[in-house]
């Protein structure tokens, strides 16, 4: 079954209609057993992708503050071989970054063949926070949807599997998580008055997310909205998204690896023949 909402063509999106909580019929224990299986499969797929060196995977993580981007990255780190994974965060642009086009800082972090990149925030901030706070004129951010689509097409045509994930939490869940940051010492480093200030723009962010997802979804670069109020369910949904993005390529990788293996064996035999 699909644990998240998939968008792979232009259409309107209303986030208010999409659940942030897990469906009642899925219990935590069963989900955790399923995560173990999916994590094992994900690790195997990563190894095949790395060995075959034909494709790469780009995971874009977006979500409101406290939505669990860091926790999702920790979860992925437990399933993947971190050799071959690059995590890139995108924060407020530096003056140098602002002096370039908005995709300039993003492109160098697209994964090389065989590798995985995880974006913690991304080029989508340029149609989210930038739109909510009018950081550039409207006609500038409006053109960016198209520019993003063209950029992602280029990346996908170069054999990068792209999955874009919005961790969807409720406003009430965010409040609880922000309050937790005040109570728990281990979380206090994440405490920022800025998060409360941004929370006041909740509705504007939801609209900006809906537009970004609606205007920038394609078969090549789908968006997935993950109900993220429960971390265990979020991890289940994210694991499934990644496995399903890579699984169709497995036969091609197995084939490529067989060819690589035969070539190496022939070279080894030749070496043994000449060395003896
Ligand atoms: P985290 O991602 O853990 O929340 P920070 O607290 O440092 O990390 O937040 C990064 C901040 O950078 C966010 O508020 C985000 O909206 C902002 N940001 C990222 N990209 C841009 C951008 N292109 N323009 C303006 N602000 C941005």
Image (cartoon, rainbow, N blue to C red):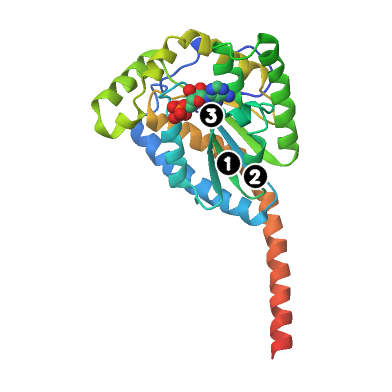
SS class of the residue under badge 1?
A: strand
Tell me if I can see residue 87 in this picture: yes
At label 1, counting other C-alpha atoms closer than 10 Å, the crowd grade (few under 14, some 14-19, many 20 or more) is many
At label 3, counting other C-alpha atoms closer than 10 Å, the crowd grade (few under 14, some 14-19, many 20 or more) is some
Dots 1, 3 in contact, CB < 8 A:
no
Q: Quadrant of residue 194?
A: top left
Q: Earlier in the sequence, mark 2 or mark 3?
A: 2
SS class of the residue under badge 2?
A: strand
The one nearer the camera, 11 or 114, is: 114
The one nearer the camera, 98 or 228, is: 98
Q: Is residue 205 left or right of residue 104?
A: left
| Residue named by callout 1 | 117
| Residue named by callout 2 | 56
Dots 2, 1 in contact, CB < 8 A:
yes
Q: CA distance from mark 2 to mark 1?
A: 8 Å
| Residue named by callout 3 | 121
271 w.r.t. 258: above or below: below
Q: Is residue 276 left or right of residue 186?
A: right
Q: Is residue 160 left or right of residue 186?
A: right
Q: Position of residue 254 (x, y in %)?
A: 66, 55
- Furthest toward the bottom, the residue is 276
Q: Residue at x 62, y 50 (%)?
A: 49
SS class of the residue under badge 3?
A: loop
Q: Position of residue 30 (x, y in %)?
A: 38, 35
Q: Position of residue 95 (x, y in %)?
A: 59, 28
Q: CA distance from mark 2 to mark 3?
A: 19 Å
Cβ of mark 3 under 8 Å from ligand 1: the answer is yes
């Amino acid at each position: 079954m699909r644990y998240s909402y998939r968008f792979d063509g232009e259409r309107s999106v209303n986030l208010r209609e999409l659940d942030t909580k897990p469906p009642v019929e899925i219990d935590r224990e069963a989900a955790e057993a399923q995560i173990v299986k999916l994590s094992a499969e994900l690790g195997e797929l990563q190894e095949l992708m790395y060995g075959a060196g034909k494709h790469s995977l780009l995971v874009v993580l977006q979500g409101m503050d406290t939505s669990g981007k860091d926790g999702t990255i920790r979860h992925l780190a437990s399933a993947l071989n971190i050799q071959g994974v690059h995590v890139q965060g995108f924060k407020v642009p530096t003056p140098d970054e602002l002096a370039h086009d908005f995709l300039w800082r993003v492109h160098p972090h697209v994964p090389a063949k065989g590798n995985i990149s995880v974006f913690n925030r991304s080029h989508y901030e340029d149609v989210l926070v930038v739109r909510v706070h009018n950081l550039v004129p409207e006609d500038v951010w409006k053109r960016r949807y198209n520019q993003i689509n063209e950029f992602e097409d280029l990346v996908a045509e170069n054999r990068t599997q792209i999955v874009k994930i919005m961790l969807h939490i409720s406003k009430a869940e965010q409040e609880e998580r922000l309050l937790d940051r005040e109570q728990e010492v281990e979380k206090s480093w994440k405490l920022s008055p800025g998060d409360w200030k941004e929370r006041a723009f909740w509705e504007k962010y939801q609209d900006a997310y809906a537009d970004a997802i609606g205007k920038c979804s394609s078969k090549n670069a789908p968006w997935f909205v993950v109900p993220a109020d429960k971390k265990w369910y979020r991890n289940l949904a994210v694991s499934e998204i990644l496995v399903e993005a890579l699984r169709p390529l497995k036969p091609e990788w197995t084939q490529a690896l067989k060819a690589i293996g035969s070539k190496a064996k022939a070279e080894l035999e030749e070496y043994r023949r000449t060395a003896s």
